[in-house]
Amino acid sequence: MEREMTVTEAARNFADVVARAFYRGESARLIKNGRAVARIVPVEEAVRFNTGTELARRWADPNRPRLSPAEAEALDADLKEARRALPPLEATSWE
């Protein structure tokens, strides 16, 4: 079941909206200025990882989705560009 609500309403009731998604499997379509701008949807059980063992098992699954070589290269290029765009880290008193 998906309900519509304004972004303001969702913000005021955020914990409830998240609880409804988690416990009841409900989705919410968020409206701003009369237009749908976002959705809050429950995470499918298949992508919830309760343990490191479960994550490792799913990672090793030969049927899991994989990037093509072109997609992997594009992702690598995007990550490198994003890293270049970051400001340099400043030294902290922790170092």
Image (tube, rainbow, N blue to C red):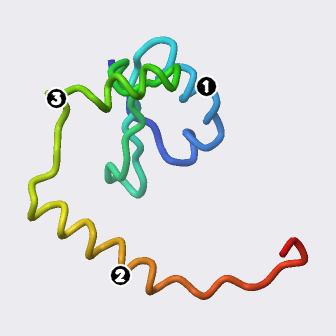
Work out which quarter of the rendered image holds the C terminus and state it. bottom right
Q: Amino acid at mark 2?
A: Glu
Secondary structure at badge 1 equals helix
Q: Which residue extends farthest top?
A: 24
- In the image, is residue 94 above or below residue 39? below
Residue 57: x %, y % from top left:
35, 22
- In the image, is residue 79 above or below residue 86? above
Mark 1: few, some, or many residues within 10 Å (few <14, many ≥20)?
Answer: few
Whole-number angstrom distance, CA of label 2 to CA of label 3: 30 Å
Q: Is residue 15 left or right of residue 72?
A: right
Q: Amino acid at mark 1?
A: Asp
Mark 3: few, some, or many residues within 10 Å (few <14, many ≥20)?
Answer: few
Q: Which numbered disc flags the more N-terminal residue, 2 or 3? A: 3
Whole-number angstrom distance, CA of label 1 to CA of label 2: 38 Å
Q: Is there a contact, CB below 8 Å, between mark 1 and mark 2? A: no
Tag on residue 81?
A: 2
Q: Which residue is mark 3?
A: 62
- In the image, is residue 82 above or below residue 56? below
Q: Indicate the quadrant where residue 88 lies.
A: bottom right
Tag on residue 16?
A: 1
Residue at 51% from the left image edge and 13% from the top image edge: 23
Q: Amino acid at mark 3?
A: Pro
Residue at 37% from the left image edge and 18% from the top image edge: 45
Residue at 52% from the left image edge and 21% from the top image edge: 51
Q: Which numbered disc flags the more N-terminal residue, 1 or 2? A: 1
Q: Is there a contact, CB below 8 Å, between mark 2 and mark 3? A: no
Whole-number angstrom distance, CA of label 1 to CA of label 3: 38 Å
- In the image, is residue 30 above or below residue 63? below
